[in-house]
Image (cartoon, helix red, strand yellow):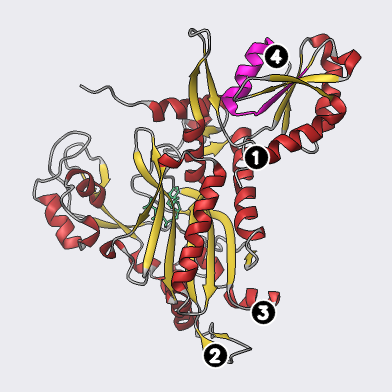
Amino acid sequence: MPEKDDTFEKITTHLITSGFVYPGSEIYGGLSNSWDYGPLGVLLKNHLKDLWLRHFVREIEYNVQIDPAIIMNPKVWEATGHVANFHDPLVDCKYCHSRFRADDLVKEQCPDIDVDGLDQKALNEIVQSGRVVCPKCGKSQFTEIRQFQMMFKTFIGVTEEKSSAVYLRPETAQGIFVNFKNVLRTTRRKLPIGICDIGKAFRNEITPGNFTFRTREFEQMEIEFFFKPGEDEKWFAFYKENCRQFVERLGLRPDHVRFRNHEKEELAFYSSATTDIEYLFPSLGWGELMGIACRGDYDLKRHMEKSSQDLTYLDSETHEKYVPHVVEPSFGLDRLMLALLMDSYEVEKLEDGKDERIVMHLAYELAPYTAAVMPLSNALKEEALEVFRMIHPEFDAIFDTTGSIGKRYRREDAIGTPFCVTYDFDSKNDHMVTIRERDSMKQERVAIDNLADYLHDKMRKDRRL
Ligand code: ATP
């Protein structure tokens, strides 16, 4: 029997014990597949958002950012087809009552079948034919497929009536489409224009799991890029290249990243082309991190029909009037973060051959803390604290006084801190500190007065682009 690959589990355990992620509502026994980010997770997430904003908003001259509401007029979701079509095909095992997505069962157990090309009747026939078995108990008797609405429904106001029903948004994109005219008018920009948004989305997934890979609430970083019809190929290629550069900037191992073009049958009916960027997760295999889709004029046209508003664009130079086409790069922040954490984790054998350390090789600009300041002895605490206070306003830094220096180094390696700054007995006289770098473990003396410049310089040099 091949050994079971438990790398994914090992890393997630490390992430929980070190404080990147906590189980949600833990003191009440948790809530299935709900996760909270701890201080380390939040810092990493913020750095990832900052990098995304820099790469896609600040460095692309056409783009601006907005922040629309999570709860929108329910007509939005009627217009987009989410109310009618945002369903998953659900089946229950009649023996052990475990619940599955029928399409996942067929995908995993019948590799010869193209699941994306099947309608519900055909999918149900396969599930009922005995070709798939319950992954939990091995039996092969399932309920008929039921369609399960994935949008979370809630009510505004005091009464739970149909008329006050609203949904938590299942994607951030629609807040952008409904504001297309507002953004054009108030920014006085012309096409092309990219409108970007980072925010939470909610999906009542039937089979959430694999830690933060699939959850019921997650953050998306999306761009709707509007342009003149006919320029679809140009902007699709532009964003594919930009997304490739972004992934490179994150420092993900290139052989663990692939671009996968959707086959014709897999494409949404309104999309002329879609490419996913996938990451090779340990134990899980390839998983989607993001998608870049050519959406044509589908969304704007649907909103024009449903809202009776004119969302066409008038080109003031050529006097042409048209409904813009759209390319949508859509990143899942939590999945991207999970990929980064998995990618950067290493259990490294040390030179003596006996000892080992856990080290997270995160890009310097993404690591939760840039530096950990530590006194060699508690007698030097006050002086070391001064050094910490000096750099803290400029860098995410941590002050650590507990345990031996060796233990403190290991603790920082395990959360990816690039620099440990030690104040020792010589520091009082020579006004220098010892800086130890995470990956090489090399140490050097640096003047306290130059510490901030030193860190800035190292950060700059570590940048991938
Ligand atoms: P999947 O096929 O994995 O369900 P999707 O194709 O439905 O994903 P999109 O609607 O394209 O996903 O959303 C864009 C991105 O949002 C995905 O690439 C993924 O990174 C992220 N995402 C989608 N659903 C979830 C979820 N339930 N939990 C965490 N991230 C998610």
Instruction: Give the residue drawn at x 51%, y 55%.
Output: 243
**Residue 165 in sight:** no
Q: Earlier in the sequence, mark 3 or mark 4?
A: 3
* Secondary-structure class at tag 2: loop
Give the residue at the far bottom of this rendering.
319
> Would you say the residues marked 1 and 3 are in contact, meaning their CB atoms lie under 8 Å apart?
no
Are the residues flagged by discs 1 and 4 in contact, CB closer than 8 Å? no
Other-residue count near label 1 (Cα within 10 Å), few / some / many at <14 / 14–19 / ≥20: many
Residue 123, image quadrant: bottom left
Going by the image, does 401 lie left or right of 111?
right
* Label 3–label 2 contact, CB within 8 A: no
Query: In which quadrant of the rendered image does the N terminus lie?
Result: top left
Question: Disc 3 on helix, strand or loop?
Answer: helix
From mark 3 to mark 2, how far is it between C-alphas? 17 Å
Separation (CA) of disc 3 from disc 4: 57 Å
Q: Which residue is mark 4?
A: 402
Name the residue furthest left.
129
Q: Amino acid at mark 1?
A: Glu
The residue depicted at 71 percent of the width and 34 percent of the height is 458
Dot 4 or dot 2, earlier in sequence: 2
Determine whether 305 is above or below 335 in the image: below
* Residue range (magenta): 403-422
Q: Is residue 428 magenta?
A: no
Label 4 is placed on what type of residue?
Answer: Thr
Disc number placed over residue 365 in the picture, else none:
1
The percent position of residue 399, horizontal first and vertical second, equals 74, 24
Q: CA distance from mark 4 to mark 2?
A: 68 Å
Dot 1 falls on a residue whose secondary structure is: loop
Which residue is label 2 attached to? 320
Viewer-closest of 58 and 137: 58
